[in-house]
Amino acid sequence: MKVTIVGAGAVGASCAEYVAIKDFASEVVLLDIKEGVAEGKAMDLMQTATLNSFDTKITGSTNDYSKTAGSDIAVITSGIPRKPGMTREELIGINAGIVKEVSSKLIEQSPDVILIVVSNPMDTMTYLVHKTTNLPKNRIIGMGGALDSARFKYRLSEALECPPSDVDGMVIGGHSDTGMVPLTRLATRNSVPVTAFLSEERLNQVAEDTKVGGATLTKLLGTSAWYAPGAAVSGLVQAIACDQKKMFPCSALLEGEYGLNDLCIGVPAILGKNGLEEIVEIELDEAEKNKIKESAEGVKKTNSLLEI
Ligand code: NAI
């Protein structure tokens, strides 16, 4: 199993580290445009192999795509992250060109590759890759909901004063401060609905804190986060590599599901060896349906800025 990660920045390197530690891939190639950075991070990570007990071989490359040939899965994290006060949508100008070029170079070397798009604005970048490559739709997946759901569960566990592992919950919709739809009604603590423990007001607060989860960290860090994003991407990579048939909210190209068409947005999906194997249509109530419709309108507005 060969995994390529383009963009050896904060998220790309974190993802490489989690993939290596989980030890399911034989090879990870980190590629970056900045001279020496990918090679340096790969070497640094390889020097953790005996400390962290993994056999994954990590190599780095400065923009030499021949090194990525034969990749089963490729993750695209190349591009610029947001700074405090910026929205993800503001990154479109620079990142669209980068994502388009990187995806085409990856496919040239690995025609059977499954692509995971991370660069922001992620739903629009995922849509761009669908529109500009000939890959079947199951082989292009956007990562956002897995991270947003992890942040939702963290906020729920904080409100419930319980370990995060007791909590389950999901965020669907667009990966943006206004587009996320945390499904508070369906969230559970040890299989009991959290609505049994938390007031509507407290749950609304949890939802709001979740939606600005990335912005809160960007303000604290001066740039966007990397540990949870890297871990979330590695979860998707593992589900595909190990054919886990595991459900994650992912940005998928919709063709009528949830009453939506011709956009990529976060919906629950089963991931396995074929990539995005199935979109799961969960029963939403009227308020949730309206929220996802509104979220889709926001994503489409950003998509309209693309020059395809
Ligand atoms: P970073 O600045 O640390 O790393 C980006 C890397 O991409 C840099 O090393 C840069 O040299 C490289 N790069 C730029 N153009 C390239 C090209 N043409 N080819 C190869 N490499 C190139 O940024 P960070 O924090 O790793 O974030 C990366 C992207 O991921 C950003 O767009 C950010 O907004 C996004 N992001 C998305 C998340 C999600 O949930 N979808 C979560 C966190 C970040």
Image (tube, rainbow, N blue to C red):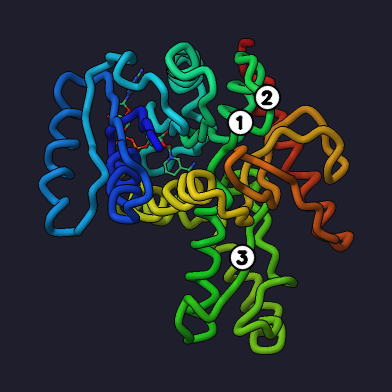
* Residue at 59% in and 62% down: 208
Q: How far from the left and from the top, in percent, is residue 42?
A: 19, 36
- Assess disc 2: are there few (<14), some (14-19) or many (≥20) residues with their C-alpha within 10 Å of its C-alpha: few
Q: How far apart in space, not on screen, are marks 2 and 3 (Cα)?
A: 34 Å
Q: Nearer the viewer, residue 49 or 217?
A: 49
* Residue at 69% in and 21% down: 304
* Residue at 40% in and 33% down: 77
- What's the residue type where badge 3 is placed? Ala
Q: How far apart in space, not on screen, are marks 1 and 3 (Cα)?
A: 31 Å
Q: Which of marks 1 and 3 is nearer the N terminus?
A: 1
Q: Which of 128 and 210 is in front in this view?
A: 128
Q: In which quarter of the image is ligand 1?
A: top left
Vertical relation: 307 (above or below) 61: above
Q: Name the residue under label 2.
A: 136
Q: Do the residues labelled 1 and 2 touch (CB within 8 Å)?
A: yes
Q: Earlier in the sequence, mark 2 or mark 3?
A: 2
- Quadrant of the image containing the C terminus: top right
User: Which quadrant of the figure has residue 255?
Assistant: top right
Q: Are marks 2 and 3 in contact (CB under 8 Å)?
A: no
Residue 218 visible in the picture:
no
